[in-house]
Image (cartoon, rainbow, N blue to C red):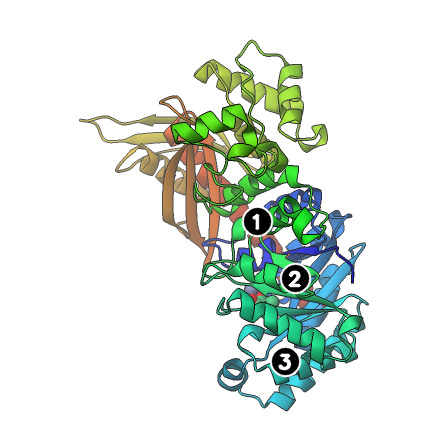
Amino acid sequence: MTNQVKIFDTTLRDGEQALPASLSAKEKLQIALALERLGVDIIEAGFPVSSPGDFHSVQMIAREIKNATICGLARALKPDIDACGEALKVADHFRIHTFIATSEIHVGAKLKKSQDEVVEMAVAAVKHARRYTDDVEFSCEDAGRTHIDYLCRMVEAAIDAGATTVNIPDTVGYTIPSEFGGIIAQLFNRVPNIDKATISVHCHNDLGLAVANSLAAIEQGARQVECTINGIGERAGNSSLEEIAMILQTRQAMLGFETNIRSQEISRTSKLVSQLCNMPVQANKAIVGANAFSHSSGIHQDGVLKAQNTYEIMTPESVGINKNNLNLTSRSGRHVIKHRLTELGYKTEDYDLEAVYSAFLQLADKKGQVYDYDLEALLFFDQQKHDEARYKLLYLQANSGREIIPSATVRLQVGDEAITKTAIGNGPVDAAYNAIMNILGHNDLEIVDFKLDSKGEGADALAQVSVIAEYNGRRFHGIGLATDIVEAGVKALIYVINNTYVADQIDQQKHLQERVAGV
Ligand code: KIV
Ligand code: ZN
């Protein structure tokens, strides 16, 4: 049996489905590109049948990503599988992932079917998916609570029907490592055709055991692990990709497994996902938390200075954290910025140096010293390619104080037109938001969450605003960054509005296609 473990990333599917607001297609593509560079083998890009937006983003990712297999999720139903086949056919390599629940509780209470009927549905789904591709994955949802006899029967039937990967999810994060490893061991002992497929695992973290269960499964023969960046996902989340990858790498001598993960990309990918998904990473999170490589106690600090490995089992550099204190100020030239970005792991094709440099100079003029996290924040916004956006901020003036009524004037570029409005509010951000709503000319956008944070340290840190707004029954997330709090808030709202505009375009296109097709 090979010692190569495939990393199947489901940040954009299981992870995304648990977010407070969905990602735009552009944001999903940005994450997919980062995952490709991280070296994941399979990217589960979404659930195409679930919405026109999901279909569109899976298709976009399938078109752009060349070095990973792109996968779409489908229930064991023909329309789901057809939507997957349709969205994925533009990819160089693609996989259809179809699933049905197998535990007694799911089969009886949720599906209201007999066990025989569920096997028939699974077999039919796998066969139907094989019409589109040779790469078909079948999942036994809630396998962790499925009777082992029925699980063996289902796995054998799915492989016979043509599944090339069979996934064993612990959907509700119920099992413990010895038990979950035991399930995998029994499958290898009892399913006669098991060698015809790769056995995969997909563990949820309800009891904090997702990574431990995945590892136990690998030790018993599983050769694909489904996981997400920062462990995001349904409820308590999924197995965390960075933890799985670093366990296999750090303990390679003992465990003997390999992955294709380029670990130096981990930190950057984690930050990107946290930022775009509006999911902060806890400071003491393994591998990617802010404190994962900081030493607090005097004894530990002394030890690390004498020999790094006294208290560090892996280096920060191995996960892409570069501790460098180059002084970046308005006197730093382009080449210094480019050099620092390269050290931080960015490739020149990732960003527009001129745009980043000019934003850097503006920031350096305001702040004096620019830090790595500032530079990464500028890059993040450059990657958002705001200049392609329909709504752009041209001008902002906000007034507030103790004895005055807060007011704001905002000028936005809206397509070819520049529109200016003034409004009052209960604070300068509220006033600016009212002015923007006046420019939009409708009130269909409801702000449901507004968070202000600082990026960096000290009073001159950049303000970062995260906004979630509801529009037409869906939630959209936006981020804004500026040295000024009101400007950061306004940028976050404009980000949201641009995403709602793109979502409207996709919906309209879909309706048009349906009308033409006579659906
Ligand atoms: O948790 C689960 O069972 C899933 C399946 C769709 C693989 O996410
Ligand atoms: Zn799941």
**Is the residue 117 above or below the residue 95 in the image?**
below
What residue is drawn where x is 51% and y is 47%? Answer: 277
Q: Nearer the viewer, residue 92 or 69?
A: 69
Q: Is residue 13 left or right of residue 208?
A: right
Q: Nearer the viewer, residue 102 or 444?
A: 102
Q: Residue type at mark 2? A: Glu
Q: Is residue 517 left or right of residue 479?
A: right
Q: Which residue is disc 1 drawn over?
A: 243
Q: Which residue is disc 2 drawn over?
A: 219
Q: Earlier in the sequence, mark 1 or mark 3?
A: 3
Q: Secondary structure at mark 3?
A: helix
Q: Position of residue 481 (x, y in %)?
A: 46, 32
Q: Which residue is disc 3 drawn over?
A: 151
Disc 3 residue crowd, few under 14, some 14–19, many 20+, Cα 10 Å: many
Q: Which of the image's four quarters has the N terminus?
A: bottom right
Q: Nearer the viewer, mark 3 or mark 2?
A: 2
How many numbered dots are placed on residues in this image?
3
Disc 2 residue crowd, few under 14, some 14–19, many 20+, Cα 10 Å: some
Q: Residue type at mark 1? A: Glu
Q: Secondary structure at mark 2?
A: helix
**Distance between mark 3 and mark 2 Cα atoms:** 20 Å
Q: Earlier in the sequence, mark 2 or mark 1?
A: 2
Tell me if residue 408 can be seen: yes
Disc 1 residue crowd, few under 14, some 14–19, many 20+, Cα 10 Å: many
Q: Is residue 189 left or right of residue 317?
A: right
Tell me if residue 51 can be seen: no
**Distance between mark 1 and mark 3 Cα atoms:** 28 Å
Q: Nearer the viewer, mark 2 or mark 1?
A: 2
Q: Residue type at mark 3? A: Leu
Q: Earlier in the sequence, mark 3 or mark 2?
A: 3
